Image (cartoon, helix red, strand yellow):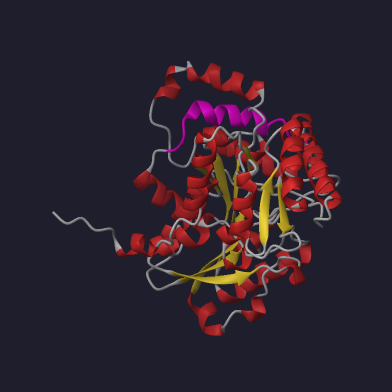
Amino acid sequence: MKIEFSNSLKRLPKYIFASIEELKLKKKKEGIDLISLGIGDPDIPTPDFILDEIAKELRNPKNHQYPSSNGTPEFRQAVSRWYKNRFNVIINPDTEVSHVIGGKDGVANISRAFVDPGDYILAPSPGYPVYQNGAAILNSAHAWVLPLTKENNFLPDYDKIPKNIIQKAKILYLNYPNNPIGAIADEKFLKKSIEFALENNIIIIYDNPYSEFTFGDYIAPTILQYNGGMDCAVEINSCSKMFCMTGHRVGWVAGNAKIIEGLVKVKSNIDSGGPAYIQNGVIRALDMYKSPKKPEFVENIMKIYEQRMKYLVNRLNNMDWKVEMPKATFYLWAPLPNGETNSMEFTKKLIEVGVVVTPGIGFGQEGEGYVRFAVTVDINKLKQACDKIELVIKK
Protein backbone atom coordinates (compact mmCIF):
# COMPACT_ATOMS: atom_id res chain seq x y z
CA MET A 1 0.00 0.00 0.00
CA LYS A 2 1.33 3.41 -0.97
CA ILE A 3 0.49 6.21 1.44
CA GLU A 4 1.13 9.76 0.34
CA PHE A 5 0.73 13.11 2.05
CA SER A 6 -1.65 15.65 0.59
CA ASN A 7 -0.25 18.25 -1.77
CA SER A 8 -0.77 20.89 0.91
CA LEU A 9 1.23 18.92 3.44
CA LYS A 10 3.98 18.37 0.89
CA ARG A 11 4.22 22.14 0.45
CA LEU A 12 5.09 22.70 4.08
CA PRO A 13 8.72 23.85 4.35
CA LYS A 14 11.39 21.65 5.85
CA TYR A 15 11.69 21.98 9.60
CA ILE A 16 14.62 24.37 9.83
CA PHE A 17 15.36 23.59 13.46
CA ALA A 18 15.96 19.87 12.89
CA SER A 19 19.75 20.23 12.88
CA ILE A 20 19.58 22.37 16.02
CA GLU A 21 17.55 19.69 17.80
CA GLU A 22 20.13 17.09 16.81
CA LEU A 23 22.96 19.24 18.16
CA LYS A 24 21.07 19.88 21.40
CA LEU A 25 20.55 16.15 21.88
CA LYS A 26 24.23 15.52 21.20
CA LYS A 27 25.29 18.09 23.80
CA LYS A 28 22.92 16.66 26.39
CA LYS A 29 24.41 13.20 25.85
CA GLU A 30 27.83 14.75 26.41
CA GLY A 31 26.60 15.98 29.78
CA ILE A 32 26.38 19.67 28.86
CA ASP A 33 23.62 21.50 30.74
CA LEU A 34 21.86 23.57 28.11
CA ILE A 35 20.33 26.91 29.06
CA SER A 36 17.42 27.53 26.72
CA LEU A 37 16.71 31.12 25.71
CA GLY A 38 15.02 29.94 22.55
CA ILE A 39 11.43 29.12 23.47
CA GLY A 40 8.72 31.66 24.28
CA ASP A 41 7.31 29.64 27.16
CA PRO A 42 6.97 31.45 30.52
CA ASP A 43 8.91 29.77 33.31
CA ILE A 44 6.91 31.56 36.02
CA PRO A 45 4.12 29.30 37.33
CA THR A 46 0.46 30.05 36.82
CA PRO A 47 -0.67 32.24 39.77
CA ASP A 48 -2.04 30.25 42.71
CA PHE A 49 -5.45 31.94 42.79
CA ILE A 50 -6.09 30.82 39.20
CA LEU A 51 -5.00 27.26 40.00
CA ASP A 52 -7.18 27.23 43.11
CA GLU A 53 -10.20 28.24 41.05
CA ILE A 54 -9.44 25.59 38.42
CA ALA A 55 -9.03 22.93 41.12
CA LYS A 56 -12.34 23.89 42.71
CA GLU A 57 -14.20 23.90 39.40
CA LEU A 58 -12.58 20.62 38.35
CA ARG A 59 -14.63 18.85 41.04
CA ASN A 60 -17.90 20.32 39.81
CA PRO A 61 -19.69 17.55 37.86
CA LYS A 62 -21.24 20.01 35.42
CA ASN A 63 -17.72 20.80 34.18
CA HIS A 64 -17.11 17.16 33.24
CA GLN A 65 -19.38 17.28 30.19
CA TYR A 66 -18.64 18.51 26.69
CA PRO A 67 -17.98 22.24 26.68
CA SER A 68 -19.07 24.50 23.83
CA SER A 69 -16.58 25.11 21.03
CA ASN A 70 -17.06 28.89 21.33
CA GLY A 71 -16.70 28.94 25.12
CA THR A 72 -19.10 29.10 28.01
CA PRO A 73 -21.39 32.16 28.20
CA GLU A 74 -19.64 33.12 31.45
CA PHE A 75 -16.23 33.02 29.77
CA ARG A 76 -17.36 35.15 26.85
CA GLN A 77 -18.96 37.63 29.24
CA ALA A 78 -15.70 37.89 31.19
CA VAL A 79 -13.79 38.63 27.98
CA SER A 80 -16.35 41.32 27.18
CA ARG A 81 -15.88 42.88 30.64
CA TRP A 82 -12.12 42.76 30.19
CA TYR A 83 -12.29 44.75 26.96
CA LYS A 84 -14.53 47.34 28.63
CA ASN A 85 -12.28 47.70 31.69
CA ARG A 86 -8.96 47.51 29.85
CA PHE A 87 -9.66 49.45 26.63
CA ASN A 88 -13.18 50.92 27.02
CA VAL A 89 -14.26 48.81 24.02
CA ILE A 90 -17.78 47.35 23.96
CA ILE A 91 -17.87 43.71 22.84
CA ASN A 92 -21.07 41.67 22.48
CA PRO A 93 -20.31 38.39 24.30
CA ASP A 94 -22.93 36.49 22.30
CA THR A 95 -21.76 37.37 18.78
CA GLU A 96 -18.32 39.02 19.00
CA VAL A 97 -16.31 36.58 21.14
CA SER A 98 -15.20 32.98 20.78
CA HIS A 99 -13.08 30.81 23.01
CA VAL A 100 -10.04 29.22 21.33
CA ILE A 101 -7.76 26.42 22.46
CA GLY A 102 -4.78 28.75 22.61
CA GLY A 103 -3.90 31.50 20.15
CA LYS A 104 -2.61 29.10 17.48
CA ASP A 105 -6.12 27.65 17.22
CA GLY A 106 -7.44 31.08 16.27
CA VAL A 107 -4.57 31.94 13.92
CA ALA A 108 -5.11 28.84 11.78
CA ASN A 109 -8.85 28.21 12.04
CA ILE A 110 -10.05 31.69 11.08
CA SER A 111 -8.28 31.22 7.77
CA ARG A 112 -10.16 27.97 7.14
CA ALA A 113 -13.41 29.92 7.20
CA PHE A 114 -12.41 32.52 4.60
CA VAL A 115 -9.46 31.36 2.47
CA ASP A 116 -9.99 29.32 -0.70
CA PRO A 117 -7.37 27.55 -2.84
CA GLY A 118 -5.46 30.13 -4.89
CA ASP A 119 -6.23 33.02 -2.55
CA TYR A 120 -3.51 35.06 -0.88
CA ILE A 121 -2.84 35.89 2.73
CA LEU A 122 -0.54 38.77 3.67
CA ALA A 123 2.01 37.62 6.24
CA PRO A 124 4.80 39.53 7.99
CA SER A 125 8.37 38.28 7.77
CA PRO A 126 10.01 37.78 10.19
CA GLY A 127 6.82 36.35 11.62
CA TYR A 128 5.07 33.52 13.40
CA PRO A 129 5.41 30.55 10.98
CA VAL A 130 1.75 29.55 11.41
CA TYR A 131 0.68 32.63 9.42
CA GLN A 132 2.21 31.19 6.27
CA ASN A 133 2.06 27.47 7.02
CA GLY A 134 -1.26 27.06 8.81
CA ALA A 135 -3.18 29.83 7.06
CA ALA A 136 -1.83 29.71 3.51
CA ILE A 137 -0.19 26.38 2.68
CA LEU A 138 -2.65 24.11 4.50
CA ASN A 139 -5.52 25.94 2.74
CA SER A 140 -3.86 25.45 -0.67
CA ALA A 141 -3.46 29.22 -0.79
CA HIS A 142 -0.46 31.52 -1.18
CA ALA A 143 1.38 33.79 1.22
CA TRP A 144 2.61 37.21 0.17
CA VAL A 145 5.46 38.19 2.46
CA LEU A 146 5.46 41.66 4.04
CA PRO A 147 9.09 42.42 4.99
CA LEU A 148 9.57 43.95 8.45
CA THR A 149 12.75 46.02 8.40
CA LYS A 150 14.47 48.19 10.95
CA GLU A 151 14.42 51.08 8.47
CA ASN A 152 10.60 51.00 8.57
CA ASN A 153 10.38 50.44 12.35
CA PHE A 154 9.51 46.79 11.66
CA LEU A 155 6.13 47.77 10.19
CA PRO A 156 4.86 46.48 6.81
CA ASP A 157 4.68 48.88 3.88
CA TYR A 158 1.30 48.41 2.18
CA ASP A 159 2.30 50.63 -0.74
CA LYS A 160 4.77 47.98 -1.89
CA ILE A 161 2.15 45.24 -2.31
CA PRO A 162 1.28 44.73 -6.01
CA LYS A 163 -2.32 45.60 -6.88
CA ASN A 164 -2.99 42.15 -8.35
CA ILE A 165 -1.94 40.56 -5.03
CA ILE A 166 -4.15 42.93 -3.04
CA GLN A 167 -7.10 41.94 -5.22
CA LYS A 168 -6.55 38.26 -4.36
CA ALA A 169 -5.79 38.78 -0.66
CA LYS A 170 -8.32 37.61 1.91
CA ILE A 171 -6.45 38.04 5.21
CA LEU A 172 -3.79 40.34 6.65
CA TYR A 173 -1.95 39.07 9.73
CA LEU A 174 -0.60 41.69 12.12
CA ASN A 175 1.14 41.00 15.44
CA TYR A 176 2.07 43.88 17.80
CA PRO A 177 3.73 43.72 20.27
CA ASN A 178 5.60 41.53 17.84
CA ASN A 179 6.97 38.02 18.03
CA PRO A 180 9.86 37.55 17.26
CA ILE A 181 10.98 41.17 17.06
CA GLY A 182 9.46 42.81 20.14
CA ALA A 183 8.45 45.82 18.01
CA ILE A 184 5.34 47.87 18.73
CA ALA A 185 2.80 49.62 16.48
CA ASP A 186 1.55 53.16 17.03
CA GLU A 187 -1.93 54.61 16.54
CA LYS A 188 -1.08 56.05 13.12
CA PHE A 189 -0.06 52.67 11.73
CA LEU A 190 -3.07 50.83 13.14
CA LYS A 191 -5.47 53.40 11.69
CA LYS A 192 -3.71 53.13 8.34
CA SER A 193 -4.05 49.33 8.50
CA ILE A 194 -7.79 49.59 9.13
CA GLU A 195 -8.15 51.99 6.21
CA PHE A 196 -6.17 49.64 3.95
CA ALA A 197 -8.32 46.66 4.96
CA LEU A 198 -11.63 48.46 4.48
CA GLU A 199 -10.61 49.84 1.08
CA ASN A 200 -9.55 46.41 -0.18
CA ASN A 201 -12.07 44.14 1.56
CA ILE A 202 -9.35 42.32 3.52
CA ILE A 203 -9.82 40.77 6.98
CA ILE A 204 -7.30 41.79 9.62
CA ILE A 205 -6.34 39.11 12.12
CA TYR A 206 -4.60 41.02 14.89
CA ASP A 207 -2.57 38.51 16.86
CA ASN A 208 -2.14 40.19 20.24
CA PRO A 209 -1.04 37.68 22.91
CA TYR A 210 1.59 40.12 24.23
CA SER A 211 -0.87 42.93 24.95
CA GLU A 212 -0.01 42.77 28.66
CA PHE A 213 3.67 42.07 28.14
CA THR A 214 4.81 45.69 28.22
CA PHE A 215 7.47 47.55 30.17
CA GLY A 216 7.44 50.95 31.85
CA ASP A 217 4.48 53.16 31.06
CA TYR A 218 3.81 51.67 27.62
CA ILE A 219 0.28 50.29 27.09
CA ALA A 220 -0.25 48.17 24.00
CA PRO A 221 -3.50 49.11 22.22
CA THR A 222 -6.13 46.86 20.74
CA ILE A 223 -6.94 47.40 17.09
CA LEU A 224 -10.61 47.21 18.07
CA GLN A 225 -10.43 50.58 19.85
CA TYR A 226 -10.07 52.53 16.59
CA ASN A 227 -12.87 53.56 14.23
CA GLY A 228 -13.50 50.86 11.67
CA GLY A 229 -11.65 48.20 13.62
CA MET A 230 -14.78 46.24 14.43
CA ASP A 231 -15.80 46.38 10.77
CA CYS A 232 -12.77 44.52 9.41
CA ALA A 233 -10.81 42.93 12.24
CA VAL A 234 -10.70 40.37 14.98
CA GLU A 235 -8.12 40.22 17.71
CA ILE A 236 -6.61 37.04 19.08
CA ASN A 237 -5.48 37.02 22.68
CA SER A 238 -4.24 34.26 24.89
CA CYS A 239 -3.81 33.53 28.57
CA SER A 240 -0.53 31.77 27.77
CA LYS A 241 1.67 34.81 28.27
CA MET A 242 -0.31 37.25 30.43
CA PHE A 243 -1.30 34.63 33.01
CA CYS A 244 1.56 32.12 32.43
CA MET A 245 -0.85 29.45 31.17
CA THR A 246 0.79 28.03 28.04
CA GLY A 247 0.02 24.45 29.07
CA HIS A 248 -3.64 25.18 29.80
CA ARG A 249 -4.41 26.08 26.15
CA VAL A 250 -6.95 28.84 26.55
CA GLY A 251 -7.51 32.12 24.74
CA TRP A 252 -10.12 34.02 22.76
CA VAL A 253 -10.90 35.82 19.54
CA ALA A 254 -12.94 39.03 19.69
CA GLY A 255 -14.17 41.49 17.10
CA ASN A 256 -16.25 41.51 13.92
CA ALA A 257 -19.32 39.30 14.33
CA LYS A 258 -19.22 37.84 10.81
CA ILE A 259 -15.59 36.76 11.24
CA ILE A 260 -16.43 35.25 14.63
CA GLU A 261 -19.37 33.41 13.02
CA GLY A 262 -17.02 31.85 10.48
CA LEU A 263 -14.53 30.80 13.15
CA VAL A 264 -17.25 29.24 15.31
CA LYS A 265 -18.63 27.31 12.34
CA VAL A 266 -15.17 25.83 11.69
CA LYS A 267 -14.51 25.06 15.35
CA SER A 268 -17.92 23.46 15.89
CA ASN A 269 -16.96 20.88 13.25
CA ILE A 270 -13.50 20.05 14.56
CA ASP A 271 -13.36 20.64 18.33
CA SER A 272 -15.55 20.88 21.40
CA GLY A 273 -13.77 23.76 23.10
CA GLY A 274 -11.51 23.79 26.13
CA PRO A 275 -12.39 22.49 29.60
CA ALA A 276 -14.95 24.65 31.39
CA TYR A 277 -13.01 24.44 34.67
CA ILE A 278 -10.01 26.10 33.01
CA GLN A 279 -12.28 28.77 31.56
CA ASN A 280 -13.54 29.45 35.08
CA GLY A 281 -9.99 29.99 36.29
CA VAL A 282 -9.46 32.52 33.52
CA ILE A 283 -12.67 34.31 34.47
CA ARG A 284 -11.20 34.90 37.95
CA ALA A 285 -8.06 36.37 36.39
CA LEU A 286 -9.85 38.57 33.85
CA ASP A 287 -12.10 39.99 36.53
CA MET A 288 -9.05 41.22 38.44
CA TYR A 289 -8.95 44.01 35.85
CA LYS A 290 -10.95 46.94 37.19
CA SER A 291 -9.46 49.68 34.99
CA PRO A 292 -7.00 50.16 32.10
CA LYS A 293 -4.22 49.54 34.60
CA LYS A 294 -2.85 46.02 34.86
CA PRO A 295 -3.69 44.29 38.17
CA GLU A 296 -0.91 43.81 40.68
CA PHE A 297 -0.32 40.12 39.95
CA VAL A 298 0.25 40.85 36.24
CA GLU A 299 2.47 43.84 37.01
CA ASN A 300 4.61 41.68 39.28
CA ILE A 301 5.11 39.13 36.51
CA MET A 302 6.07 41.86 34.05
CA LYS A 303 8.57 43.38 36.50
CA ILE A 304 10.41 40.06 36.69
CA TYR A 305 10.73 39.85 32.92
CA GLU A 306 11.69 43.51 32.64
CA GLN A 307 14.49 42.98 35.16
CA ARG A 308 15.76 40.01 33.16
CA MET A 309 15.55 41.90 29.87
CA LYS A 310 17.49 44.86 31.25
CA TYR A 311 20.16 42.53 32.54
CA LEU A 312 20.51 40.74 29.19
CA VAL A 313 20.62 44.00 27.22
CA ASN A 314 23.26 45.47 29.51
CA ARG A 315 25.43 42.36 29.44
CA LEU A 316 25.33 42.08 25.66
CA ASN A 317 26.12 45.77 25.20
CA ASN A 318 29.05 45.41 27.59
CA MET A 319 30.36 42.69 25.25
CA ASP A 320 30.18 45.27 22.45
CA TRP A 321 27.19 43.40 21.02
CA LYS A 322 24.91 46.37 20.34
CA VAL A 323 21.26 45.69 21.14
CA GLU A 324 18.28 47.84 22.14
CA MET A 325 15.86 47.39 25.02
CA PRO A 326 12.39 46.49 23.69
CA LYS A 327 9.23 48.11 25.05
CA ALA A 328 7.28 44.87 25.05
CA THR A 329 7.38 41.02 24.96
CA PHE A 330 10.02 38.83 26.59
CA TYR A 331 11.95 38.64 23.31
CA LEU A 332 15.17 40.39 22.37
CA TRP A 333 15.68 40.59 18.60
CA ALA A 334 19.43 40.96 18.30
CA PRO A 335 21.43 41.65 15.13
CA LEU A 336 24.32 39.23 14.82
CA PRO A 337 27.49 40.42 16.56
CA ASN A 338 30.45 41.70 14.58
CA GLY A 339 32.03 39.06 12.39
CA GLU A 340 28.94 36.82 12.20
CA THR A 341 26.85 36.60 9.04
CA ASN A 342 24.75 33.43 9.39
CA SER A 343 22.13 33.13 12.12
CA MET A 344 22.01 29.34 12.02
CA GLU A 345 25.77 28.93 12.24
CA PHE A 346 26.00 31.42 15.10
CA THR A 347 23.21 29.61 16.91
CA LYS A 348 25.19 26.38 16.62
CA LYS A 349 28.24 28.10 18.12
CA LEU A 350 26.20 29.11 21.16
CA ILE A 351 24.80 25.59 21.55
CA GLU A 352 28.37 24.31 21.61
CA VAL A 353 28.92 26.25 24.86
CA GLY A 354 25.49 25.35 26.27
CA VAL A 355 23.21 28.26 25.30
CA VAL A 356 20.19 27.88 23.02
CA VAL A 357 18.75 30.83 21.08
CA THR A 358 16.56 30.92 17.97
CA PRO A 359 18.11 31.78 14.59
CA GLY A 360 16.31 34.61 12.82
CA ILE A 361 16.09 32.63 9.61
CA GLY A 362 13.58 30.38 11.35
CA PHE A 363 11.04 33.22 11.17
CA GLY A 364 11.45 33.87 7.46
CA GLN A 365 14.14 34.94 5.04
CA GLU A 366 13.92 38.51 6.33
CA GLY A 367 15.00 37.25 9.75
CA GLU A 368 18.48 36.37 8.55
CA GLY A 369 21.12 38.44 10.31
CA TYR A 370 19.37 38.21 13.69
CA VAL A 371 18.85 35.83 16.59
CA ARG A 372 16.01 35.87 19.09
CA PHE A 373 16.47 35.58 22.85
CA ALA A 374 13.59 34.70 25.16
CA VAL A 375 14.25 35.72 28.78
CA THR A 376 12.35 32.73 30.13
CA VAL A 377 14.91 31.60 32.69
CA ASP A 378 15.64 33.01 36.13
CA ILE A 379 18.28 35.69 36.61
CA ASN A 380 20.93 33.25 37.85
CA LYS A 381 20.66 31.08 34.75
CA LEU A 382 20.61 34.21 32.62
CA LYS A 383 23.91 35.27 34.19
CA GLN A 384 25.39 31.84 33.46
CA ALA A 385 24.16 32.07 29.86
CA CYS A 386 25.72 35.50 29.41
CA ASP A 387 29.05 34.24 30.76
CA LYS A 388 29.00 31.46 28.16
CA ILE A 389 27.98 33.84 25.36
CA GLU A 390 30.86 36.14 26.28
CA LEU A 391 33.29 33.29 25.67
CA VAL A 392 31.99 32.94 22.13
CA ILE A 393 32.00 36.70 21.47
CA LYS A 394 35.57 37.09 22.70
CA LYS A 395 36.72 34.11 20.69
Residue at 62%, 68% in the rendered image: 366
Decide whether residue 134 is among the magenta residues.
no
Q: Is residue 38 visible?
A: no
Q: Quadrant of residue 292?
A: top right
Could you tell me which residue is drawn at 61 percent across and 33 percent down? 33
Front one among 95 and 159: 159
Residue 149 screen position, x and y as percent: 70, 69
| 265 in relation to 238, above or below | below
Q: Main secondary structure of the magenta part?
A: helix
Q: Quadrant of the N terminus?
A: bottom left
Q: Position of residue 74 (x, y in %)?
A: 55, 32
Q: Please report the residue visible at 53 percent of the width from the left and 55 percent of the height from the top.
A: 257
Q: Quadrant of residue 157?
A: bottom right
**Which corner quadrant of the image does residue 7 belong to?**
bottom left
x, y (%) of residue 104? Answer: 51, 48
Does residue 146 appear left or right of residue 297 in this picture?
left
User: Who is closer to the viewer here, 197 or 172?
Assistant: 172
**Which residue range is magenta in the image?**
273-290
